[in-house]
Image: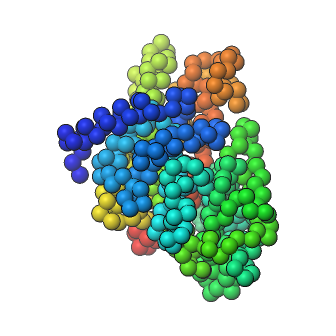
Amino acid sequence: MNLDFTPEEQAFRDEVRAFIAEQYPKHLGDTGLREDLPREDFLAWHKVLGAKGWSVPAWPTEYGGTGWTPTQRYIWSEENARVNALMPLPFGVSMVGPVIYTFGNDEQKAQHLPGIRDGSVWWCQGYSEPGAGSDLASLKTTAVRDGDHYVINGQKTWTTLAQYADWGFFLCRTDPDAEKPQQGISFILIDMKTPGVEVKPIKLLDGGYEVNETWLTDVRVPVENLVGVENQGWTYAKFLLAHERSGIAGVARSKRGVEKLREIAGSEQLDGEPLMSDFDFARKVSQLEIDLAALEITELRTLAGEQAGKGPGPESSILKIKGTEIQQRLTELTLEAVGSYGTPYYGSIANDTGSNEYQIGPDYASHSAATYFNMRKTSIYGGSNEIQRNIITKMILGL
Ligand SMILES: Cc1cc2nc3c(=O)[nH]c(=O)nc-3n(C[C@H](O)[C@H](O)[C@H](O)COP(=O)(O)OP(=O)(O)OC[C@H]3O[C@@H](n4cnc5c(N)ncnc54)[C@H](O)[C@@H]3O)c2cc1C
């Protein structure tokens, strides 16, 4: 792939850059990946993009996609990462949306795709259960047919930001007697306001609130909310996971993170010299950049494949592993660079806009420890990296 931008691509980049400069909600500032924002802040940029027709670039054009080339999508990600934009959340845009337009019926497309596009409907993911994470096919939540409804009972866990969700996509067991556990699972859409749905917070060690337990007790869901064919949900679930994993790679954001790390290491001192001139530290930063460049090319190849009609397959596991390892190393090096300034605990105070709480050390240090710890999650969610290695071994290497 030729990575030099053509004049048309440069014009596109200028257009995108100007649009972001003008339209990105100013009050969001440099929020980036923060998980502790009010619902409206999470949706602010999504709504602007929805109005412009740019909220779901990767979708087929008939469902509202932009039809951008892989290079245009690359430019789009880069330009958003430049301002650390808070991008539309993945649960609707890159997870359930593609499942609905690929496997859903016309009514489901008409009912659900517009709300995902314009950012008015928030989705959550009900896959994992206590005892069914890596071994997802062992899930126990049941959906039992009762006339024109399913009656659903069970417990999901780690449901990210379900406290804001209007709808959820859930994996439920519809055939407990199937020969293989994968064969008895269905993919069902649930209105989170349905009686019997209960979302309970899982409070994190630092007081943060981004994950939940979701309890389902005699939840009556119309059979129209079944996506595709009953007991075929495992196929749709895997299709969704491939989309989810590709999205986790976060190359453009990591590139910006490396730039920031270089700035920090240029300001921090070691024995009277900028840390960046320390050979050992500079070597670690360079190695990170080399790995990131390799990942970027791999991601571009995947994007080009998608353009040619090849959806993300098992190679999304490579993107997931490498992307999350890089994100974690980036936070490790940032914490190393700020040294003892990373130690003070600010809780949520430092996050509050307009807070005048006394802060020890430079701004860039205040969240470095919290971010370091929070980013440990990336090698677990979306299917742990060990499981991704198993997938690569089986599906790509054929071992
Ligand atoms: C922050 C966060 C957000 C999440 N959000 C959601 C969400 O919104 N919706 C949702 O449904 N789920 C969500 N998850 C759940 C996530 O998908 C699971 O945590 C993940 O799949 C791992 O499952 P587990 O936690 O049950 O760990 P386990 O499956 O118990 O695994 C424990 C350890 O054993 C290893 N292991 C297990 N089996 C194997 C094997 N066969 N080979 C090698 N190693 C193995 C794993 O890699 C891991 O290190 C989230 C998780 C986190 C941390």
Q: Position of residue 353 (x, y in %)?
A: 63, 25
Q: Position of residue 178 (x, y in %)?
A: 64, 85
Q: Quadrant of the C terminus?
A: bottom left
The answer to which image quadrant residue 82 occupies is top left
Determine whether 110 is above or below 16 in the image. below
Question: Which residue is outermost to the top?
Answer: 272
Residue positioned 29% across, 63% down in the render: 308
Residue positioned 36% across, 52% down in the render: 66
User: Looking at the image, can residue 294 be seen?
Assistant: no
User: Looking at the image, can residue 348 be seen?
Assistant: yes
Is residue 376 shown left or right of residue 72? right
Residue positioned 41% across, 30% down in the render: 21
Determine whether 251 is above or below 263 in the image. below
Closer to the camera in the image, 216 or 275: 216
The answer to which image quadrant residue 224 occupies is bottom right
Closer to the camera in the image, 84 or 337: 84
Question: Which residue is outermost to the left?
Answer: 7
Its colouring scheme is rainbow
Task: Count up the numbered dots.
Answer: 0
Determine whether 364 is above or below 44 in the image. above
Q: Quadrant of ligand 1?
A: bottom right
Closer to the camera in the image, 96 or 246: 96
Residue positioned 71% across, 49% down in the render: 163
Q: Position of residue 53 (x, y in %)?
A: 41, 48
Determine whether 328 is above or below 133 in the image. above
Q: Position of residue 20 (x, y in %)?
A: 41, 34
